[in-house]
Amino acid sequence: VSASMAVSLPPTLGLSSAPDEIQHPHIKFSEWKFKLFRLSKRLRTVMDRARQARRCKRRTQDRISSKELMKKIANCSKIHLSTRLLAVDFPAHFVKSISCQICEHILADPVETNCKHVFCRICILRCLKVMGSYCPSCRYPCFPTDLESPVKSFLSILNSLMVKCPAEECDEEVSLEKYNHHVSSHKESKETFVHINKGGRPRQHLLCSQYHKMYRTVKAITGRQIFQPLHALRSAEKVLLPGYHPFEWQPPLKNVSSSTDVGIIDGLSGLASSVDDYPVDTIAKRFRYDAALVSALKDMEEDILEGMRAQELDDYLNGPFTVVVKESCDGMGDVSEKHGSGPAVPEKAVRFSFTVMKISIAHGSQNVKVFEEAKPNSELCCKPLCLMLADESDHETLTAILSPLIAEREAMKSSELMLEMGGILRTFKFIFRGTGYDEKLVREVEGLEASGSVYICTLCDATRLEASQNLVFHSITRSHAENLERYEVWRSNPYHETVEELRDRVKGVSAKPFIETVPSIDALHCDIGNAAEFYKIFQLEIGEVYKNPNASKEERKRWQATLDKHLRKKMNLKPIMRMNGNFARKLMTKETVEAVCELIPSQERHEALRELMDLYLKMKPVWRSSCPAKECPESLCQYSFNSQRFAELLSTKFKYRYEGKITNYFHKTLAHVPEIIERDGSIGAWASEGNESGNKLFRRFRKMNARQSKYYEMEDVLKHHWLYTSKYLQKFMNAHNALKDSGFTLNSQGGLGDSLDLEDSPEPQDSMEF
């Protein structure tokens, strides 16, 4: 090879000319080969560096696009505050520490993941829903149930930050904690208003097979894990069900196991059976009362801690907290029978539930309220405790199922619960108030004679004749303890009296009371009972019974038919077999009275009927409202006057019906409402309406259940109903609704456009929404 044939190489490789070995062929070939190997290695190094640079650039671009995508998912620019509003020019690292790592706004309702990254609650929930169950910052596995509130010191620093008010013509600087209160004063400036979440209700669970099918389909189409795997949901819901959280009682509960991991138990467990015993043909499922209360308190943990902060109490206060619980129990008729296996049981059911009404803490010389249920009659806060397929009139079955539950309740009265909340062991005491019972069940569990008894009232000892002669002036005298004493007198007859004398002595107590109820009026059944009586008055006025009291049965049926036809025509009220709450609300109006007056010829009777309804409508808000002193103070002040005038009308204009007799609920309405309001502050808040609404949910849950066995079916109904009342799930659903309302859409190719619509993916078209 001649020198003129020398190889020319590019200067970028650091070689200006060909190696000497190629220029001078007399050098050994092996040395030339070694030099060429070094040259190729240098070439590979240069190419690897270029490839790494491209990969790093691509990663950076992906990270930026992923961050932009997460910002689109969060879509919170109108909800959260920008860091530009900070009044002080903080260092960049500090600003990053107090801002959300998704939306880069100032943290709002901050939550912390297991990997110690902090996000806005709504932002992280939206991202977990769309992107899958991992931390957006480090991709460590993360589920909604893993999110916790950051440490108190961090929250106090965050709340003390000063921000500028974005409203025009307002130069104020306020702390982040007081920002919401400040901007609410700017009524004209819409952009400063904090986003108002209208809330929502959790959707019902799907059947397992439906869920698996949708999970696979959506993941295949979109390539994204929009759904959680079913096992993840099951592990998440365990946290929300009774039996998950450890707790302790001081002193330990008498005759109650100290075990805390107790979930759904058989309502018949512990019932000693023998050949001579009454046969209990029922299926019953329940939670242990103390475990259910612990689960309810842990579910409300955020609300309790927020309430303490709102009252400017220190987070480290450990109590004792006083928890007031409303208890409700109701029977259900005509429960549709499933075609599953299991014993033949009555087509009736009984449900026992409770609502946490109020939580307060002793602070100094006063009790400070840290939580109060805003909607005490909502089915969303009425938690199921016991379900049984039984007849409420079957006294033996009712006592067999409810007695263990009542024993747990009695044990909790004299003990204190030790429960960790917010990282601190806190003490709780419980006050139980059994107010959500209708009159039939009150008489059943308190051992009184049935509602047709001469002893008309469950609050006082008045007979029907005494109540009709003295309509207004009575006081509450009955109590659970007194009923127990009277039962002992009835059982032993210590004075050797005749049956009538003994009955008069015990004032209608004829069985052993086994559930303690508060002597009160149930507002819902009061409405229903009074509406039924007005419905009867309308019929009697149409037939002019004040002139002709001796009408035949056929004539009375004709009056009812005339009234039903007229109400259907004028008020669109369809006739019903049995009075219910909805019919009662529509019936008790001035418009209804005007319609009825068209069927009554006498002008004088028109005036009497109008005045009677007018007085009733003035009195009704007092026992229906949750807080009459705030909601209807005028009606409350005038109640005594209105009730006396109402009683006067009954004893004069309507004497033909109320001479020597009066209905149970008219007596309670006229005689006992002011005393109960003075004692409890409200009647409406303690009503059974939430439990009645829960009855409808029971029917729906039972119809859509997956398992055929009636035995397991009751477990599923109880579990699903409990989850439905979870405040944690309700907040999660609120976040879902906020995401849905923000207009996100998911395109058919599985790519993410400007927005993501989660409404079309997580739920089927025929899913049930309450």
Image: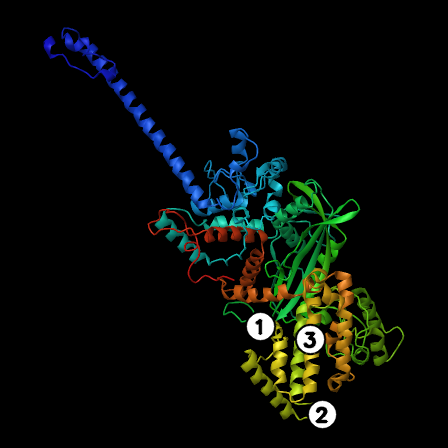
Q: Indicate whether 42 appears above or below 247.
A: above
Residue 437 in view in this figure: no
Q: Indicate whether 185 appears above or below 152.
A: below
Q: Residue furthest right?
A: 495
Look at label 2 and name its amino acid: Lys
**Label 2 neighbourhood size at 10 Å, few (<14), some (14-19), many (20+)?**
few
Q: Nearer the viewer, residue 304 or 338?
A: 304
Q: CA distance from mark 3 to mark 1?
A: 41 Å
Say which residue label 1 marks.
Answer: 347
Look at label 3 and name its amino acid: Asp
Residue 568 position, x and y percent, is 55, 81
Q: Which mark is residue 547?
A: 2
The residue positioned 74% from the left and 84% from the top of the image is 653
Residue 751 position, x and y percent, is 35, 47
Given this view, does label 3 or label 1 mark the residue nearer the observer? 3
Residue 700 position, x and y percent, is 53, 65
Answer with mark 3 or mark 1, whichever residue precedes in sequence.
1
The answer to whether marks 2 and 3 mark residues whose Cβ atoms lie closer than 8 Å is no
Residue 570 position, x and y percent, is 56, 81
Q: CA distance from mark 2 to mark 3?
A: 24 Å
